[in-house]
Amino acid sequence: MIRDGYVARWLGREFEAVPGADGDVRLYTPDPTDGFEELRPGRYRRVVPASEIEDLRYVRTVCTWRGEPFIVVGEHETWLRVEYAGGRAPVAERLGLDRVDHGVWQAWAPRNEVLDVREELI
């Protein structure tokens, strides 16, 4: 599973999370859970005060492709959407990456070519 976003620990369980400017944290789960409201099938939410959150971290999936560092930003079937994390435009150009914004380079990489896929907590 490719993750890129906040995760929170609440009552000993980990949830996908979105911290709010209002001091609350929105917790999400794919399963029906007591106290969570159904937003749509397979998506449930509960809003809790930030003071009740045991841990809040940002998690992203990183990897190596063609010997360079990348962040995995998406997936589709046997492909991963990767974003170059090396910060060197000449390397990005040599790799044939698509420039999607200033300093942001991405490509679709065959999953079987991507190495060392792992989660990184920030």
Image (cartoon, rainbow, N blue to C red):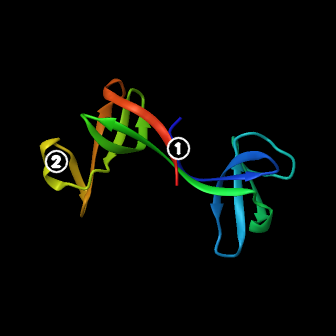
Dot 1: element: loop
Residue closest to the eye, 49 or 120:
120
Left or right: residue 57 versus residue 109 is right
Q: Residue at x 34, y 30 (%)?
A: 114
Q: Of the numbered discs in the image, which one, if any, rests on residue 3?
A: 1
Residue closest to the eye, 85 or 75:
85
Rendering coords of residue 37 (x, y %): 79, 53
- Three-letter code, disc 2: Val
Q: Residue at x 31, y 26 (%)?
A: 113
What is the residue that sits farthest to the bottom in this orientation? 22
Mark 2: give few (<14), some (14-19) or many (20+) Cα within 10 Å: few
Q: Gap between marks 2 and 1, in whole Å? A: 26 Å
What is the residue that sits farthest to the top in this orientation? 112
Assess whether mark 1 and mark 2 are in contact (beta carbons under 8 angstroms).
Answer: no
Q: Residue at x 24, y 64 (%)?
A: 102
First reached walking from the N terminus: tag 2 or tag 1: 1
Rendering coords of residue 39 (x, y %): 71, 52
- Three-letter code, disc 1: Arg
Q: Hey, which quadrant is residue 112 in on the image?
A: top left
Q: Which residue is mark 2?
A: 91
Q: Hey, which quadrant is residue 65 in on the image?
A: top left
Residue closest to the eye, 21 or 56:
56
Q: Residue at x 53, y 44 (%)?
A: 3
Rendering coords of residue 122 (x, y %): 52, 55
Mark 1: give few (<14), some (14-19) or many (20+) Cα within 10 Å: some
- In the rendered view, tell whether residue 103 sits above or below residue 93: below
